[in-house]
Amino acid sequence: MGTRSKVAIVKGLNPINSTIKALDMIESDLTAVISVEKPILIKPNYINAKHPSTGITTDSRVVEGIVKFLKERGKDHIIIGEGSGFADTFEAFKVAGIDKIAEKWNIKIVDFNKDSFVEAYPPNPLTLKKVKVAKTALESTIISVPKLKLHRLATVTLGIKNMMGALASKGTMHNGRLNSNIADLASMLKPSLTVIDGIIAGEGHETSGNPVEMNLIIAGTDPVAVDAVGAAVMGVQPKEVKHLVLAEKKGLGTCSLEEIEVVGEQIEKVKRKFRRSITSKILARF
């Protein structure tokens, strides 16, 4: 067994500072990730144009913390990109305050729904043979910045599932094979860094708007491990999340908590059992 995957958990009332603190804790893992010459894509979750305080969308202060951290280390080729599923992406950016951050730090923002799409083929697919992906996402080093929240069909929607926003058609993923499709997508659009926004999290399901104040940031370079810790913080056993188990089998990271080194806050201290929606309770039985 090699070195354990490191995941940082930071609790605090200033999201920018908490984000930077979490990234500082895993900086040794980040060196290789952010030293590449490719553009750095920050991919938040704006499934709709609701304000982050609803527990549905990514807090722009977390995005700003990442931008500040990168800029202070001389990284200038940064893009913020998303393709909203149920809203105009730029409207969603505006509601969350991403437009102001982009202006302040001189960063390009991209609506993936209007990007050029490339037909891509996930390696050794379980079920996703080919998919149309936003060109910007394929050509960048990816930082996934999801919201800490539950999901009706996928149990949780965190860093790996967040990559669905880069697809031409998000609906095609929901063909009864969602979990294996997510794992396949992750093998092609694998986040180099995941920073989960757990400031105001969301229980119930992905768009239920049941906010839970947690004041947490969870970050790491193993996308499966970060999502596993995120799930555990919401009171969900990582092995219960099918797409994480499949992603681990594909060699994309670990979802075994005993193989993860958690730094900062410990899971037991900050976790809370999130209430699940009726749909997810029924689907969990299958």
Image: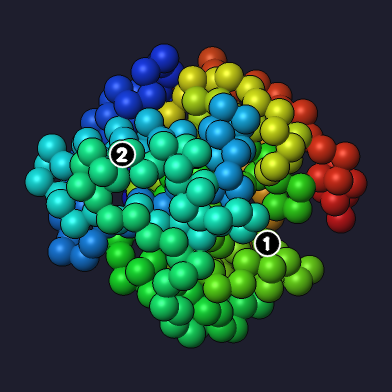
- Could you say which disc has been placed on residue 54 in the image? none
Q: Mark 1: which amino acid?
A: Asn
At which x and y percent is residue 169? 61, 72
Q: What is the three-letter code of the residue carrying label 2?
A: Ile
Secondary structure of the residue carrying numbered label 2: helix
Q: Label 1: which residue?
A: 179
> Which residue appears at 15% of the width and 52% of the height?
76
Front of the two marks 1 and 2: 2
Q: Is residue 59 left or right of residue 168?
A: left
Colouring rule applied to residues: rainbow
Number of numbered discs: 2
For label 2, the crowd category at 10 Å Cα-Cα, with few meaning under 14, some 14 to 19 and many 20 or more, is: many
Q: Residue at x 24, y 31 (%)?
A: 24
Name the quadrant containing residue 200.
top right
Q: Earlier in the sequence, mark 1 or mark 2?
A: 2
Observer able to see residue 206: yes
Q: Residue at horizontal 62%, vertical 30%? A: 54
**Compared to 107, does 10 lie above or below?**
above
**In the drawing, does residue 1 fall left or right of residue 131?**
left
The image quadrant where one finds the C terminus is bottom right
- Could you say which quadrant of the image residue 19 lies in? top left
Residue 239 position in % (x across, y down): 66, 46
| Quadrant hosting residue 188 | bottom left
Residue contact between numbered discs 1 and 2, judged by CB atoms under 8 Å: no
Q: Is residue 13 above or below residue 273?
A: above
Rendered image: mark on residue 101? 2
Q: State the residue in front, 80 or 153.
A: 80
Label 1 CA crowd tier, 10 Å (few <14, some 14–19, many 20+): many
